[in-house]
Every structure is written in structure tokens, then in C-alpha cells.
Amino acid sequence: MISISTRRLSKLNSAKTILLFADNAGEIVFDKLLIETLLSMKNFDKISYCVKGGPVINDATIEDAKYVRIDKIKNLNFRATCNGDKGTGPIRNSSEVKSWISEHDLVISKGQGNYEGLSQFNGIFFMLMAKCHIVAEDLGVDVGSIVLKYK
């Protein structure tokens, strides 16, 4: 399901800042390609790449991102959310993360876990596969559907 109007896509054209919430470590090379593709279309004053503050299952960390050299992208900085351990960063639905969202023009969230933690916020492009009935029902899709939705 793709649920994005042309008007919403115009956010990309007017955006000067990007916040991208990463998902799995194995996908970060594609995150790098996404960021580089966006940069080939226009320059951004600030790109914030949000990973987990420490290892948890297969979620991306700063070390993973540096391994694929995301840190070499111009104007990119890292943000980190909590991995469940104290001191690894704010939880996704915290006021601190809400302020990160509000200070960026374009916000992209990848993965079902990030959708579950961020879906109460507006102004986010969500990219995920609906892996369970609860999330699929919330999105109005079948389990297994690939979703790109602006909320």
C-alpha cells in the first residue's frame, strides 16, 4: 500500500533537514543509498540518522553505520534511541524524540518497530512491512504488505 499524495511528496522538495530512523543493520547500506539519492536531487542543511544506542537483536547501531561509511555523508549527524538498556538514549515516544521530529522538515521512519514507537506522531513517512495483525489492522492492510504511508 502506498498512501502518499503529490502534495505530501512536495515536502521532499521544500525540506532542508532530514531525520531518518534506521531499522535493521542489514539494511543500512540501502539507507546510505537512499540518503545519497536524496542528496543527488538537492542539498540538505542537516541530515540526522537515528540508530539504536547499543546492540539489540539486529537493529542498526552507530558502529554498523560507520562500517558502511554513512558518517562520511556531508552534513550528517547521528542520533540514538534506547535499546532497552539505561543510558543508551531516549525512548522513541519521549518528548526528546518528539523535539527531534519537530526540528526536521522531512522525517522517514523505517521498520515496524519504529512505526509502533512513533505512530502517535504526525508528519512522518513510514516505510515498513506489516508483520502482525495489530499493525496491519492499524494501517488498513493485510499482514505481509509493504507499506509507504505518510501520517
Image (tube, rainbow, N blue to C red):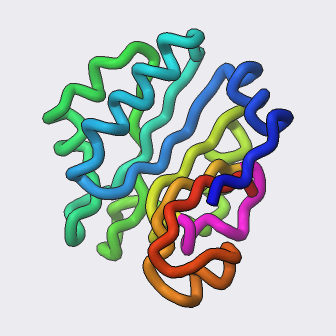
User: Quadrant location of residue 18?
Assistant: top right
**Residue range of the region highlighted in magenta in the rendering:** 115-123
Kindly give the residue lying farthest to the right in the view shown. 7
Kindly give the residue lying farthest to the bottom in the view shown. 133
Residue at horizontal 56 percent and vertical 60 percent from the top: 147
Q: Quadrant of the N terminus?
A: bottom right
Q: Is residue 117 magenta?
A: yes
Residue at horizontal 45 percent and vertical 74 percent from the top: 144
User: Quadrant location of residue 115?
Assistant: bottom right
Residue 67, percent across and down?
14, 35
Residue 149, percent across and down?
67, 55
Q: How many marks?
A: 0
Residue 31, percent across and down?
37, 38
Q: Quadrant of the C terminus?
A: bottom right
Residue 101, percent across and down?
66, 47
| Residue situated in front as seen by the camera: 130 or 12 | 130
Q: Is residue 116 magenta?
A: yes
| Residue situated in front as seen by the camera: 97 or 131 | 131
Is the residue 51 above or below the residue 49 in the image?
below
User: Quadrant location of residue 131?
Assistant: bottom left
Kindly give the residue lying farthest to the left in the view shown. 67
In the displayed structure, does residue 69 sit left or right of residue 145? left
In the displayed structure, does residue 146 sit left or right of residue 148? left
Residue at horizontal 62 percent and vertical 26 percent from the top: 17
Residue at horizontal 68 percent and vertical 50 percent from the top: 124
| Residue situated in front as seen by the camera: 45 or 33 | 33
